[in-house]
Amino acid sequence: MAAPSTPIRLHRHPLSGHAHRVELMLSLLGLPVEPIDVDLRGGAHKRPEFLAMNPFGQIPVIEDGDVTLADSNAILVYLAGRYDEAGRWLPRDPVTAARVQRWLSVAAGPLASGPASARLVTVFGAALDHERCKSVAAQLFAVLDRQLADSVFLAGDAPTIADVALYSYTAHAPEGGVALDAYPNIRAWLARVEALPGFVPMRRSAVPAAV
């Protein structure tokens, strides 16, 4: 499908990895975007006008014409399905599609409860068990590093939305106190993602990062 005639509105926060994965996907697809920063500290995401777009009161949310959609992984599926006619980012063959879904589940599970949550503690002051979050992150990254020893990208030899879904919080794990120096395959994979045409980085937070 051709690119939209008007920019896709992205309701985001610049330090949110969930929002960044959507921003990254939009850029990789070369789609026009209108970023709208949501004042999370001021509670804008809990006001009626925002809850009308996402009753869970969470970012990101996109508005694409008459389509309003929340949840970062769901948005990745939508953008790839609607705007990537070649099926590169969301492959149609059953095996690769299943591999992609597996990593989307990881993004919503161990990635969220591990490195993403560890970063919530250090960057946003969330009242979570930081040591447990770091432990979950270490277990995840051990598995991920082994996976990437034999695979260029997460679902095979080409990038998919699986890589987009896991990139942001993995790359920014050091901001949550989770160092990446012990995971050479992960660091090489991050570099491959960052070399993709259209890559856009996520803003770094001000907290000291583990190395």
Image (tube, helix red, strand yellow):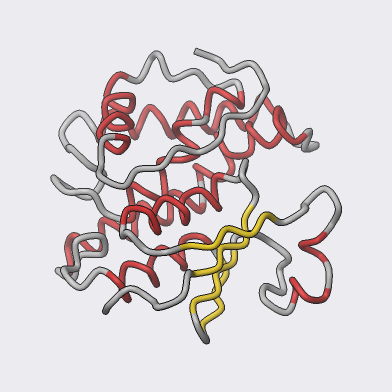
**For the point 40% across and 56% down, which residue is it?**
104
**For the point 78% across and 33% down, which residue is it?**
125
**For the point 51% across and 82% down, which residue is it?**
67
Q: In this rendering, would 96 be left or right of 71?
A: left
Q: In this rendering, would 34 be left or right of 158?
A: right
**For the point 50% across and 38% down, which residue is it?**
202
Instruction: Give above or below for 70 relative to 101.
Output: below
The x and y percentages for residue 20 are 51, 48
Instruction: Give above or below for 114 relative to 30.
Output: above
The x and y percentages for residue 26 are 40, 59
Instruction: Give above or below for 132 relative to 79.
Output: above
Q: In this rendering, would 27 be left or right of 114?
A: left
Tell which of 90 and 33 is nearer to you. Answer: 33
Furthest-front residue in this view? 5
Quarter of the image with the N terminus is bottom left
Q: How many marks?
A: 0
The x and y percentages for residue 203 are 55, 35
Instruction: Give above or below for 186 relative to 74.
Output: above
The x and y percentages for residue 49 are 78, 76
Q: In this rendering, would 80 be left or right of 72?
A: left
